[in-house]
């Protein structure tokens, strides 16, 4: 083989080998330094400073920060962390760099307000974020929806929610359901139907996977809560009628003239304890239910979000 | 396998293994050719060098002549491994031209050389010496020798960016011979030199020959080649037009003789031979065809005219050159000169 | 063989020095001393932080600029100026030339960084009045910065072996910027689907990952750095450099010089 051929072979082999080694090492390094990035990132946690530091490339930096926000939340949510201290600053920086980055507001509404482990538990900051968004995007009706959403779901301030939906409905090209939501929250606040409307609206109007999944789980939870409610009141009625608890859920269903035992959204039938308590078969599959849980229930692992939707 | 065949095989293997073999040629060019792809999409082929076959013996000064753009520099670059041939191979001092070790015995002066201008002459030669594998002690001594040889001893600590063109050329020669190469390639060594410089370079080349070094130099200045070369090759538009000793080349063109006689009269018989005659002072000078030499002598004797001199007139290399080139240009497309490198 | 590489490396170093590259140290020294004096007059708490951050960032940026500016011309300048002819007509292999150039440039940067390190420690001493044990971490940060330089040098050399200085500068600089955001590129890749995901993931692995080598912030906060991190970063830089240099060798071996 000529000298040149020899060099070619060695250099090619070296190239292939090094490339492989680099990829492998990077994967290893990922495990050693997972959190370093975000803490690094927020070394500058004042939006003004970041804006100055981006040397005018605000849009690009906003995108970068947005990517980091999503990564940050997803990573922590999956590991069932209880704190999301950096979420608010990340969102604030992102929107300071680019006030028109609408997905950020939506994200804040869904995940800044709810209590841990599903959110940062900072509804006030969520409100501030929405108001900032509305100030900078007055023609966007969806931001009013996001704001009203926070009032309704976390603060349970139905009056404010209704007012916000109403204001939003006046924005040109607002979706008709804004008016409906305004009316609904004014008159039937606290109803399952209202809640269902709200979560369906969120599910339909968002394109972000996390938010849709979140809404889907809430809808499933509402279904379960409703079902368990009805079944539980049936148990009470049974008790008032017969003076005793039903011996099994089948007896209860027969007494209520139901064609079969009701099933949860996963298709599993509800069960009843000897004490007359209605339970859902797999509570772990329904992250947001407030009824149908066995006493002293604690979730056993990361929240199981269903992927369909 | 017959013994002859066996011997032949062994011989070829030995040659291919680069084992130096007695009576080998210094340079053997075996069909080197180069085609460049030009154009925006690199699709149009441009022939820089037609397949070249050439042999240069050890110890001779060989001239590689041709006008600018003929392919001289391309050939040299290919031999140096700077450019890769499209086809063909070459052997230098019996080894493949791509063998890096053979370069330790070769010196090269490129056309219009540039050197690291932040170095002094001394430092440059030291660096090159290191790269050529000249060991420490030898190097110091040799550098001084070589600088003296080219006349740059006074400027050895001057940065090369302050050198004149002629000085750079001399440094170039210095670096080419620094490591006592057996074979030296010079690309236009006289370019940019004043007559004194050219004389010095000529002397140096002569001296190299005396030391047994083979010199291969390319030039478009014919008088230099005439003065120095044992043999020349002429190349034009990438094709070899002729190879051989200068005398043979020039005498292949129909020779003439010059006859000088005393007196001022031109005999009629001379005129009849078709001689061109010039009277100057008290001699007449006539030029006529070589094959009429005897007839001319007879004519003069008959007239009792005193012959002063008869000199065979060799066509100059220049005339040969021009004629050859014109021929190759007008012979639209016909291959001129042999590709087998036959001696003319 | 290795002797020739050493000679070429030494000559490359000599060229850089005579090109007055080390004068950048003066600018650096001025910047750093100015900052140290200025900062020591503001709050007590953060002056150390500022000096370390500023100092290390300046070392990194100055070095990258030098690496790119010298690196892009390493091969292309020699081809343009034809100084390469007389080198390659000697028993120097083409790959030896590339490797020698690399070590010459890397050596220049190491020397440069050494002097800058003295500057940083000097400024630190000025504002903090004494060294504390965690300050040794600054040496680790400097080591990582040198690893960064090795990668940049090899990339600049790679581009120089086939491209003009201007294009090489653009490529090298772009890769430096993208490489600094390599983690974000990986994050972005995870968010995409289909072909874009393949492409983005491939790109994210292929660009030099400078974010892993950037420990300036943790070091400024005196956070400890694990031995595993140091080892793996070293290996990564080594292999990445080897990759770029292999590419440079492969290209240069084939190049017809004009």
Image: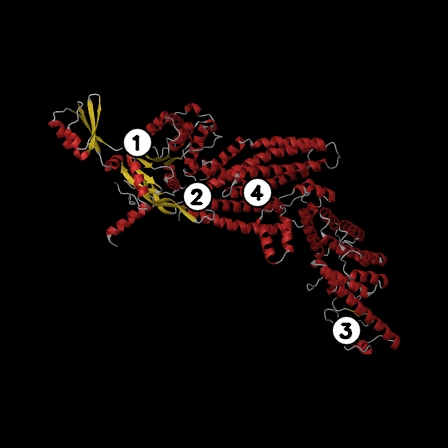
Q: Residues within 10 Å of mark 2 (few under 14, many from 20)?
A: some
State whether residue A169 is above or below residue C6: below
Q: Residue at x 45, y 27 (%)?
A: B163
Quarter residue B74 falls in: top left
Question: Disc 4 marks which residue?
Answer: C170
Above or below for A309 versus B202: below
Q: Could you confirm whether marks 3 and 4 are on the same chain?
A: no
Which residue in the protein does label 2 denote? C256
Q: Are marks 3 and 2 on the same chain?
A: no
| Along the line of sight, the residue nearer the viewer: B106 or B297 | B297
Alpha carbons under labels 1 and 3: distance apart? 112 Å
Q: Are marks 1 and 2 on the same chain?
A: no
Q: Secondary structure at mark 2?
A: loop
- For label 1, the SS is helix
Q: Which residue occupies the foreground of this view, A134 or A69?
A: A134
Q: Label for residue B228?
A: 1
């Amino acid at each position: 083989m000529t000298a040149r051929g020899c060099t070619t072979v060695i250099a090619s082999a070296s190239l292939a080998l090094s490339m492989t080694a680099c990829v492998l090492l990077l994967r290893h390094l990922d495990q050693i330094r997972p959190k370093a990035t975000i803490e690094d990132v927020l070394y500058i946690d004042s939006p003004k400073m970041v804006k100055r530091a981006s040397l005018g490339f605000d849009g690009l930096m906003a995108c970068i920060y947005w990517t980091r926000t999503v990564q940050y939340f997803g990573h922590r949510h999956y590991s069932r962390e209880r704190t999301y201290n950096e979420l608010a600053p990340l969102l604030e920086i992102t929107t300071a760099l680019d006030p028109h980055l609408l997905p950020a507001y939506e994200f804040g509404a869904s995940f800044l307000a709810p209590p841990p482990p599903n959110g940062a538990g900072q509804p006030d900051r969520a409100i501030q974020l929405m108001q900032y968004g509305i100030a900078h995007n007055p023609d966007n009706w969806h931001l009013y929806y996001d704001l009203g959403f926070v009032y309704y779901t976390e603060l349970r301030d139905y009056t404010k929610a209704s007012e916000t939906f109403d204001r939003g409905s006046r924005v040109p090209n607002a979706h008709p359901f804004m008016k409906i939501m305004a009316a609904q929250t004014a008159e039937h606040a606290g109803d399952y139907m209202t809640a269902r409307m709200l979560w369906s609206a969120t599910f339909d109007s968002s394109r972000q996977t996390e938010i849709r999944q979140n809404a889907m789980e809430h809808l499933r939870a509402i279904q379960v809560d409703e079902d368990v409610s009805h079944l539980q009141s049936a148990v009470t009625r049974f008790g008032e009628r017969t003076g005793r608890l039903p011996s099994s859920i089948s007896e209860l269903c027969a007494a209520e003239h139901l064609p079969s035992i009701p099933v949860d959204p996963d298709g599993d039938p509800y069960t009843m304890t000897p004490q007359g308590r209605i339970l859902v078969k797999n509570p772990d599959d329904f992250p947001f239910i407030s009824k149908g849980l066995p006493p002293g229930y604690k979730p056993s692992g990361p929240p199981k979000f269903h992927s369909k939707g | 396998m017959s013994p002859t065949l066996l011997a032949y095989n062994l011989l070829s293997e030995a040659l291919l293994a680069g084992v130096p073999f007695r009576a080998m040629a210094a340079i053997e060019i075996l069909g080197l050719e180069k085609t460049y792809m030009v154009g925006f999409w690199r699709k149009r082929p441009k022939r820089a060098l037609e397949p070249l076959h050439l042999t240069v013996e050890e110890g001779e000064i060989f001239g590689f002549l041709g006008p600018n753009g003929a392919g001289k520099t391309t050939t040299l670059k290919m031999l140096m491994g700077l450019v890769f041939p499209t086809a063909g191979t070459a052997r230098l001092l019996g080894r493949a031209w791509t063998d890096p070790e053979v370069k330790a015995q070769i010196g090269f002066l490129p056309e219009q050389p540039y050197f690291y201008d932040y170095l002094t002459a001394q430092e440059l030669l030291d660096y090159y010496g290191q790269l050529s594998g000249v060991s420490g002690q030898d190097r110091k001594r040799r550098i001084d020798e070589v600088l003296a040889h080219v006349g740059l001893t006074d400027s050895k600590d001057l940065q090369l960016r302050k050198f004149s063109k002629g000085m750079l050329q001399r440094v170039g020669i210095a670096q080419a011979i620094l490591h006592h190469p057996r074979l030296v390639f010079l690309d236009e060594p006289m370019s940019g030199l004043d007559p004194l410089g050219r004389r010095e370079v000529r002397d140096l080349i002569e001296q190299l020959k005396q030391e047994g070094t083979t010199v291969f130099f390319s030039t478009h200045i014919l008088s230099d080649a005439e003065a120095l070369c044992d043999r020349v090759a002429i190349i034009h538009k990438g094709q070899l037009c002729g190879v051989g000793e200068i005398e043979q080349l020039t005498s292949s063109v129909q020779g003439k003789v010059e006859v000088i006689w005393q007196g001022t009269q031109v005999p009629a018989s001379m005129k009849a031979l078709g001689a061109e005659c010039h009277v100057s002072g008290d001699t007449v000078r006539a030029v006529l065809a070589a094959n009429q030499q005897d007839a001319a002598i007879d004519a003069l004797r008959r007239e009792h005219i005193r012959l002063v001199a008869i000199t065979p007139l060799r066509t100059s290399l220049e005339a040969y050159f021009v004629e050859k080139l014109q021929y190759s240009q007008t012979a639209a497309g016909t291959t001129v000169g042999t590709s087998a490198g036959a001696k003319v | 063989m290795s002797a020739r590489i050493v000679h070429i490396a030494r000559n490359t170093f000599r060229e850089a020095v005579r090109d007055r590259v080390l004068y950048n140290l003066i600018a650096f020294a001025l910047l750093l001393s100015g900052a140290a004096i200025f900062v020591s007059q503001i709050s007590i708490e953060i002056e150390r932080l500022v000096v370390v951050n500023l100092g290390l960032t300046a070392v990194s940026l100055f070095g990258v600029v030098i690496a790119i500016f010298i690196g892009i011309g390493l091969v292309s300048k020699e081809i343009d100026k034809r100084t390469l002819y007389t080198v390659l007509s000697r028993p120097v292999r083409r790959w030896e030339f590339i490797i020698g150039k690399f070590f010459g440039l890397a050596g220049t940067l190491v020397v440069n960084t050494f002097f800058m390190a003295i500057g940083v420690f000097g400024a630190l001493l000025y504002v903090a009045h004494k060294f504390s044990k965690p300050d040794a971490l600054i040496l680790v940060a400097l080591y990582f910065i040198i690893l960064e330089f090795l990668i940049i040098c090899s990339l600049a050399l790679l581009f120089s072996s086939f491209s003009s200085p201007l294009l090489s500068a653009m490529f090298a600089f772009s890769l430096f910027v993208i490489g600094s955001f390599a983690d974000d590129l990986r994050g972005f890749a995870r968010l995409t689907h289909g072909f874009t995901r393949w492409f983005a993931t491939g790109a994210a692995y292929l660009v030099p990952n400078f974010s892993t080598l950037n420990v300036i912030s943790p070091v400024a906060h005196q956070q400890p750095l694990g031995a595993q991190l140091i080892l793996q970063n070293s290996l990564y830089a080594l292999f990445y450099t080897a990759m770029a240099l292999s590419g440079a060798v492969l290209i240069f071996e084939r190049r017809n010089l004009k």
